[in-house]
Amino acid sequence: MEKDDARARSVDESPNASRRQALSRGVALAAGAGLVVATLLKPRVARADDGDATLLNALLSAEWAAIAAYTAGAQYLGAPDGGDPMASAAPTVLAVAQHFAQQHQDHATQLSAAVTAAGGTPVAQSSVTFTPPNGWTASVLNVLKLAANAEKAAAIAYTDTLKQISAAAAAQLVASIGGDETQHYTILSLIILGVAAPTADTLSMATDVVPRSFTASPGTGVEGLETVPDFTYA
Amino acid sequence: MKSDTSRRDILRWSALASTGAVVAACSNDAGGGNDAGADANPSDGGNDAAIGLLNALLSAEWAAVAAYGAGASILQAPPQNDPLAASAPVFLAVATHFQAQHQAHAGALGSAIVQLGGTPVDQSSVTFTPPAGFTASVTNVLKLAANAEKAASIAYNATVPQLPQSNELRFLAGSILGDETQHFVLLYSLLKGVAAAGPNVSTGANQIAPTDFVSTVGSDMGLQSVADFTYS
């Protein structure tokens, strides 16, 4: 805790500057997360005649937004305010956030390929813009809450998209990513609720928090939970 | 652990571990060999294939219900020297919660089968085979459940592309899949030591995978019914 506090203070000792930094980080992060939620609503209101490419592109947009949001969140987690009551947990939360961001990158890669296979043009990562949610201020807890809310919305959106998607392979991909979003949501929400807590090993084993980007492999060279060994009995 | 009861319980638990394999095998057969990566719509095969797939999933859910019930009996009376005996009541609450969710999945699958004109497999038809090396302990109950939930997640994912797009069957399978993955990730994280029980765990079992389905199925609400966290 003391070490983290000292690191946070070393960024800028000025109260005003610190406040500005926090606000700046807050706007950036909040903006990203806001877009995540907004974008993820698209599949649920998609028209009945929307094709697979449109549906998949809506999900791809959400993945780009998630990456942007986690990246912005990482900026705050890398140097939380000294007065943040969860500042000491920031390095662990940062490691998990970076792991989740990488998994969203993996999703985006597969969705881009699926959009192309469906005859569409993948939406560009640079097309994402940001709008901050109301009431958001920068803190470790609020980073967790933003992420949990967005992952929940994503899980629902992916599942609802299965009502409309046509191609079998695309359906499997959508289901496989949806199962990963629910895992992110579970971990984040349980930590926020105090039902689960990080351990001393979480920081060094962050990639084991949600061990694969996909529930099941969507294609050659991409690993799903099939590659996670079963526990053996002692 | 009383001998006869304990043995039967372990046998029943094994069903959970074999759930995924059962579903995967059945879905491959019933799906008419439709490759998961193929774009063909399986609805061409009519309702029989879908009924077969759904019944395989239903069998697995019945096995899970039975297995969690058996696991509960171990957690209610863990071996006295079990190092996790003190945690057994908390895990029992979680196991009971997960079991109820598998029961809800079974109900939804049974309804879907009936709507397709099929007959849901009966709960009593499930049989059990013990996994090699399993002995009764709190840790082994968690391991068996984690292995089985992982297998179930993969199996549901494999089944999705084999189901027809119509009748929202893919949606139903996906909505259950996401619940299984929630079960898996908590159990996995605890066993790997990357998460531990938090201060509110004793009263929070129902907040772990808080809804039976990821998205609302019929009158059974999904995660839409879980309020967003507010910012402080």
Image (spheres, coloured by chain):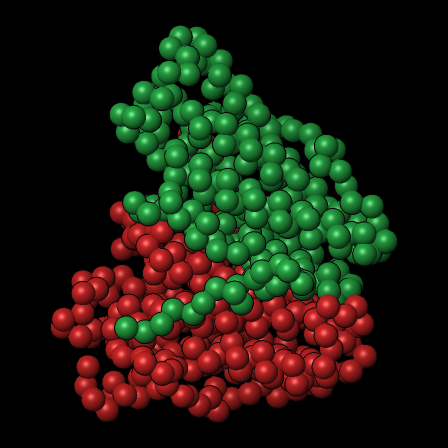
> Image check: A156 left or right of B188?
right
Farthest residue in the left direction? B80
Q: Splitting the image into 4 quarters, where does residue B187 fall?
A: bottom left
Residue A209 vs residue A191, the one in the foreground: A209
Numbered label tally: 0
Residue B101: where, in percent of width, then height? Answer: 45, 68
- Residue at x 78%, y 64% (from the top left corner): A167
Residue B66: where, in percent of width, then height? Answer: 40, 81
Residue A214: where, in percent of width, then height? Answer: 58, 58
User: In the rendered view of the protein, which quadrant contains the C terminus of chain A?
Assistant: bottom left
Question: B53 above or below B8?
Answer: above
Residue A138 vs residue A106, the one in the foreground: A106
Q: Chain B is drawn in which colour?
A: red
- Residue at x 38%, y 56% (from the top left corner): B189
- Can residue B82 be seen in the rendering of this structure? yes
Question: A145 above or below B93?
Answer: above
Farthest residue in the front direction? A221
- Residue at x 48%, y 55% (from the top left corner): A211
Question: B171 above or below A40?
Answer: below
- Can residue A159 be seen in the rendering of this structure? no
> Image check: B151 left or right of A119?
left
Q: Colour of chain A?
A: green
Residue A12: where, in percent of width, then height? Answer: 41, 12
Question: B135 above or below A34?
Answer: below
Q: Splitting the image into 4 quarters, where does residue B73 fall?
A: bottom left
